[in-house]
């Protein structure tokens, strides 16, 4: 798919999802994770914050009370229209939204104290491009906080998991494993300080909540129920309990900082293969890996 076609495709899908993103109720896990994003980004009252792939502004609004200014960018006009409507309804004055591609951030180098991106990475075809952009616009000693659902370190599980995610939302490109996600951030030259993993359990209907296309919802349910009956966890602990289908996603939060000298791009360290993800990460990058069970 050409980039322009892909952009249009993502815009169409999220324009369709926008209404549901605003209406859906936040889970206790999500609320906890928003607080963890704010803590990891170490936002204080003079900070300028960039929220990349901001959607309807969930993260932007959560960070706004602690910051001087939050700028949210997204390529879906529909999602941004909802974000602006919410800003108006809530009377929030220090959040601004702009239509922009994460691969070409409309900001000078070193212009933000913190950059956050929640649930954007798995929509990017070449996430190195977008994460490099995020690092570019970060000031020296600025913090980057990336949150995304991750998949298994086991390639077969990850392939099946990602295929199911693409059937749910065709704009989904690929959820990375935790080691791939931290390597991705490290390749920009930022120093990865921390990686947390938060399990998020949902039933099928909650997971499908934002998908505004009944035919997808029905067909995927048949496929996933069959997988669950066959005992396939599919990388997301797929299971049937009392006739209800359940999934557990792992949400990773990766925090990195730009050094006082700025950015020195480097190639990814090797390693992080099947089954070694956690030990490799903590050993080679000196980061704190915490498996958290959010509320
Ligand atoms: C799953 S939503 C997450 C929204 C928001 N970050 C949140 O956590 O609620 C993903 C968002 O990424 C946006 N997106 C996808 N590809 C993008 C790109 N290349 N540049 C900017 N935004 C993009 C979509 O339009 C959508 O709003």
Image: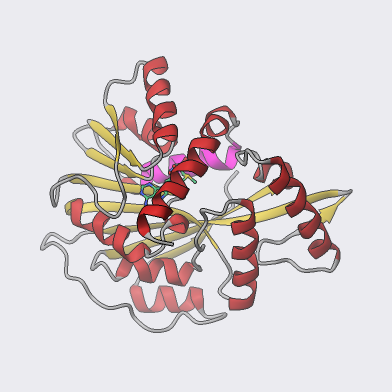
Q: Residue furthest left?
A: 261
Q: Is residue 39 magenta?
A: yes
Expressed as whole percent of the image width and height from the top left, the position of residue 251 reads 53, 55
Span shown in magenta: 27-40
Residue 32 in the image: state x and y as whole percent. Answer: 52, 41
**Magenta span has 179?**
no
The picture places residue 68, in percent across and down from the top left corner, at 22, 30
Viewer-nearest residue: 173 or 271: 173
* Residue 289, image quadrant: bottom left
Total numbered badges shown on the rendered structure: 0
Residue 213 sits above or below residue 61 on the image: below
Residue drawn 34% across and 47% down? 116
Residue at 41% in and 39% down: 76
- Quadrant holding the N terminus: bottom left
Above or below, 105 against 160 in this view is above
Colouring style: secondary structure
Task: Say left or right for 161 vs 46.
Answer: right
Q: Is residue 57 visible?
A: no
Nearer to me, 103 or 288: 103
Residue extending farthest to the right is: 242
Residue at point 29%, 43% (across, down)? 100
Q: Is residue 231 above or below residue 11?
A: below
Instruction: For residue 238, say whether it is visible.
Output: yes
């Amino acid at each position: 798919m050409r980039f322009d076609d892909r952009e249009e495709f993502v815009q169409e899908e999220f324009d369709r999802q926008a209404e549901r993103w605003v209406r859906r109720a936040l889970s206790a896990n999500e609320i906890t994770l928003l607080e963890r994003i704010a803590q990891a980004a170490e936002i204080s009252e003079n900070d300028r914050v960039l929220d990349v792939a901001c959607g309807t502004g969930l993260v932007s609004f959560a960070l706004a009370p602690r910051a001087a200014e939050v700028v949210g960018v997204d390529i879906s006009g529909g999602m941004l229209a909802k974000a602006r409507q919410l800003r108006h309804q809530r009377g929030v004055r220090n959040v601004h939204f702009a239509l922009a591609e994460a691969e070409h951030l409309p900001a000078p180098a070193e212009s933000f104290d913190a950059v956050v991106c929640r649930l954007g990475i798995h929509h990017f075809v070449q996430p190195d491009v977008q994460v490099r952009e995020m690092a570019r616009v970060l000031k020296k000693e600025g913090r980057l906080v990336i949150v995304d659902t991750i998949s298994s370190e086991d390639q077969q599980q990850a392939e099946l998991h990602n295929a199911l995610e693409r059937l749910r939302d065709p704009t989904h490109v690929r959820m990375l494993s935790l080691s791939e996600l931290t390597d991705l951030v490290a390749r920009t030259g930022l120093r990865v300080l921390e990686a947390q993993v938060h399990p998020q359990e949902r039933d099928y209907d909650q997971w499908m909540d934002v998908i505004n296309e009944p035919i997808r919802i029905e067909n995927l349910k048949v496929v996933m129920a069959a997988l669950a009956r066959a005992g396939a966890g599919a990388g997301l602990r797929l299971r049937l309990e009392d006739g209800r289908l359940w999934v557990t996603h792992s949400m990773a939060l990766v925090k990195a900082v730009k050094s006082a000298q700025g950015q020195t791009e480097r190639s990814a360290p090797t390693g992080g293969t099947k089954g070694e993800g956690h030990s490799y990460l903590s050993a080679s990058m000196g980061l704190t890996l915490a498996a958290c069970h959010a509320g």
